[in-house]
Amino acid sequence: MAGKLKPMSQIKQLLLLHGQGRKIKYIARTLGISRNTVKSYLGRIQDLKLDSGDILSIDDPELEHVLSGGNPAYKDDRFEYIKSKLDYYQQQLKQKGVTRKLLWEEYLEEVPSGYGLTQFCFHLKQQLLARKPSMVLNHEPGEKLFIDFAGHKLSYIDIGTGELIQCPVFVACLPYSDYAFAIVVRSQGIDDFIFALRQCLEFLGGSPIILVPDNLKSAIVKANRYEPELNRALEDFCNHYGITVLPARVASPKDKALVENQVKLVYNRVYARIRKLQFFDLHSLNEAVLDKIRKHNQTRMQKKPYCREERFLSMEKGKLLPLPETQYEIKYYRELTVAQNNYIYLTIDKHYYSVPYKWIGEKVKVIYTRSIVRIYIRGEMVAIHPRDYTIGGYSTILDHLCSHHQHYLKRSPSYYMERAEKISKPLLQVMQSLFNGGRPPEQNYRTCDGLLSISRKTSPEIFDEACRRAIEFKCYSYKYILSMVEKMQKYGLPEKEIFIPLPEHKNIRGRDYYNQLSLNL
């Protein structure tokens, strides 16, 4: 009965014909098998003392096992020896330089009549695989998003230099529908990683409950099998979108097997299909990738009666969390000291931002994004500025400065005019004459400050009179008006001239008389 086993349904036919008293030659001709095979099966059944009625009621796999008696290799003492040494072999294979062939050579030294290399490796592989069974994971719609970077890169040509720019490819998929997304980014750095994630969520039109990244540096600061340390930017991103992060275990690609398989599909349905095209910028390259990804999602799956997009739209998209109204911006964290001039210096932009002057010398925590800079002291936000990329520039909120500094920054001709108008009209006229004198405005600021100082220390009557004298004699300097004030304070205000009108009479020539060209006497 050497060779391949016959189908058990055919063996049952053999027994039925034999039970009807048919000859071996007839049975062999009817079933299309040799007479020796018929004799072998009948002899085997007789040796095992099996009842033909029982055999007909046994299912085919059970009957096959009864008749074959199992593979003799698994009853061999040599197999039992290998089985007893599995723990040892498993530990040895983890050591550097140890191979299956080396273990087989050592095995032959102990068991000279043992298995050959092929059989030894086969049994060793079978037993090691049996120790690590693979589990089928069931995924709920909208629950998880698997993400990874493809091992191979795509490229575009720099039109200025002709250089070929290699760029990594971010790949993601929803395990329930296997709906895929891919985008080419400049690097695997945190900025590009977060950008790719944000584009992925906008492509999906919602957020999953759980994000499953690989242990890449952009997502994980320190890898650990049970409690990996997440990148703070990724934590902020997921908090913004209401997502929980559950990284895959170290060196455990099966934790996100679907995205690993998706990468292979992207190689075939994206990489291979654009390999003959040339791109001259990242934008055009991503347009081509996105077009191929859409076609990939719309391609009917081989073993299922639907495509990925149909499955996603009908069963999964409605289960995703809604996206927040505002887009996420990466937050960067710094701890700085407020300088004596009540500014902090953001090194990355080489720019200064003001802080209320009462916090000079204090340590502050700074959180800045692409557009906003927030400054905190003892848990309280004390300043917020639009981010400014001007190198060496100062972003100032006047209320942060002391009164002296505020005054200094507010100085302008209009500022002094407004203040003078509130004090007196003569002072306003003096300042107008100053700024209309042709000198640069900055040269008059200190004179104006001096005049305002005099006005605060002098009675309005004396000060206004001093300003009138300055206007009369067209001398607007600080020293002249100060000397006028000091004289008036010492000698008093000058007496006003009393105007006594002439009595009315008819002997008045008037203006017309003096305007005539020839005198009429």
Image (cartoon, rainbow, N blue to C red):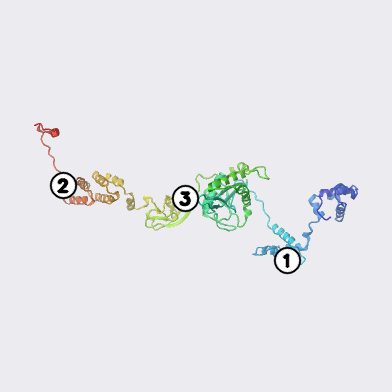
Please state if 517 lies on the left or on the right of 37 as rendered.
left
- What is the distance, in whole Å, between disc 1 and disc 3 at their CAs? 64 Å
Q: What residue type is labelled 3?
A: Arg
Residue 100 visible at all: yes
Distance Cα–Cα, label 2 vs label 3: 67 Å
> Which circle marks residue 107 in the picture?
1
- List the single residue furthest toward the bottom: 109
Q: Nearer the viewer, mark 2 or mark 3?
A: 3
Q: Which amino acid does label 2 sit on?
A: Pro
SS at circle 3: loop
Closest to the camera, between mark 1 and mark 2, is: 1
Q: Earlier in the sequence, mark 1 or mark 2?
A: 1
Binning the other alpha carbons within 10 Å of mark 1 as few (below 14), some (14 to 19) or many (20 upward) gives some
Residue at label 2? 494
Tag 3 residue: 370
Q: How far apart are marks 1 and 2 (CA)?
A: 128 Å
Q: Position of residue 440 (x, y in %)?
A: 29, 49
Residue 144 visible, this angle: no
Which numbered disc covers residue 65? Answer: none
